Image (tube, grey):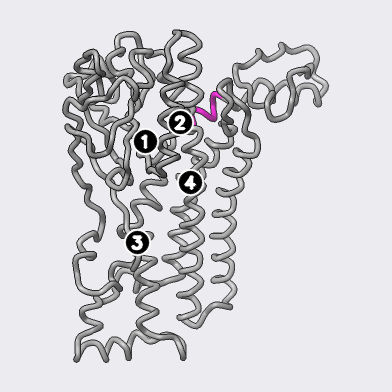
Amino acid sequence: ALHSTTFEIDEKHGTDYHKKFVEFVKMVQKENLVIGGAMTDPKGDRSKGPAEQDDPDLFTRIVDTDDKGVYVSGAKAHQTGCINSHWIILMPTVRLTENDKDWAIVGAVPADVKGITYIYGRQSCDTRSMEDGDIDDGNAKFGGQEALMILDRVFIPWDKVFMNGEFEFASMLIERFTCYHRRSYVCKTGLGDVLIGAAATIADYNGVPNVSHIKDKIIEMTHLNETIFAAGIASSHLGHKMKSGVYLNEDMLAQVCKHNVTRFPYEISRLAQDIAGGLVVTLPSEKDFRHPEVGPLLKKYLAGRRGADVENRMRILRLIENMTLGRNAVGYLTESMHGAGSPQAQRIQIQRQMQVGYKKNLAKNLAGITNDIEEPKELSEYFDRVFKTKDSLL
């Protein structure tokens, strides 16, 4: 998104952001670094823009400038993976007006730069990771984290500044960033694959892998998961070249991909809980399982089919809990809802590009309607790009 946006800022204003950004990318690639894209501001009163807030720091802004660079203050919220990133790129999060020039800043800073404070977020069941054992963690190998980043006069040198006051390009950057990001939420299908596997495993341990309604639910989970994947792949396949030379995936299908993600993981999770049964939320702890007196009772009464190890049954139930209620539900459910933009953000973009007038003209043509007004041309280029319709009479 920055590759194409900086190119077009330079084209209009004669700046050198694009060259500086390309040099930064070369450094990142050469050193194999991880970048955290920090876009989301706390926002404060959502009915007001940055310049209208009671506290101007609720959106990240320039607070000072000298011959070496700029200083910014503010905060970035919901920053997944920021603590294990090497660099952070700070970007605006909303469409800006001329009154918001001080908030039109894009720049890259080291993750440990002076003035950044990370406040680690809480997650459901997070303290289980501090207990002995690994069964109650659910995911015995991996976890995740989000943090609130506080920026107090953080310095950005001029060679790492990629937007500075060009407020009219904020919306372009945001829309292109979210186009890539919403398509990238096809990653949730990987989590879906794991949860489908967990549901199939607990069905096996329960002795019911071949029961028809169990099989049907796993089919439905797979159908939903692959529908997400299909939209994401289609968006990439229909990508088009930008002025700067990079490709941008198809925006309409990126919105559809992410909008599916705001819904389908919840249904996949519901079906996984349905298949797993009530032990997902009533299972005793690993400490009880290891207890010399209680443990043998649990092994006796929590047995599944013959040959299914009771500990393995506990582990897969904890994984289902972890993904649908616990720590990983942060990434699989709530992040699926709000990450890369909440559902209404996708619906707005879909509305902008759905070209209902064009579709009405198609219908009128087939119905033989000739004495009605022609629907007005629409701004969206979706059909032009996908179906090469620029020369169409419709």
Q: Type of residue at label 3?
A: Phe
Q: Which mark is residue 181?
A: none
Per the rendered image, the range of residues in magenta is 347-352
Distance from the alpha carbon under mark 4 to that under mark 2: 17 Å
Q: Are marks 3 and 1 in contact (CB under 8 Å)?
A: no
Q: Kindly indicate whether the residue at mark 1 contacts the one at mark 4 (C-beta within 8 angstroms).
A: no
Report the residue marked by disc 3. Answer: 142
Side of 291 relative to 342 (left or right): left
Q: Give the spatial CA distance, label 2 vs label 1.
A: 10 Å
* Distance between mark 2 and mark 3 Cα atoms: 27 Å
Residue behind mark 2: 177
Comparing marks 4 and 1, which lies closer to the viewer?
Answer: 1
Q: Nearer the viewer, mark 3 or mark 4?
A: 3
Query: How crowded is the residue under tag 2: few (<14 C-alpha within 10 Å), some, or many (20+)?
Result: some
Residue in view at x 23 percent, y 39 percent? 112
Predominant SS of the magenta segment: helix
- Mark 2 and mark 1 lie on one chain; the one further toward the N terminus is 1
Q: Earlier in the sequence, mark 2 or mark 3?
A: 3
| First reached walking from the N terminus: tag 3 or tag 4 | 3
Task: Quickly name the residue at label 1.
Answer: 37
The label shown at residue 261 is 4
Q: Nearer the viewer, mark 4 or mark 2?
A: 2
Compared across the picture, whether 205 is left or right of 327 comes to right
Query: In x, y percent, where is residue 166?
Result: 38, 13
Which element is circle 2 on? helix
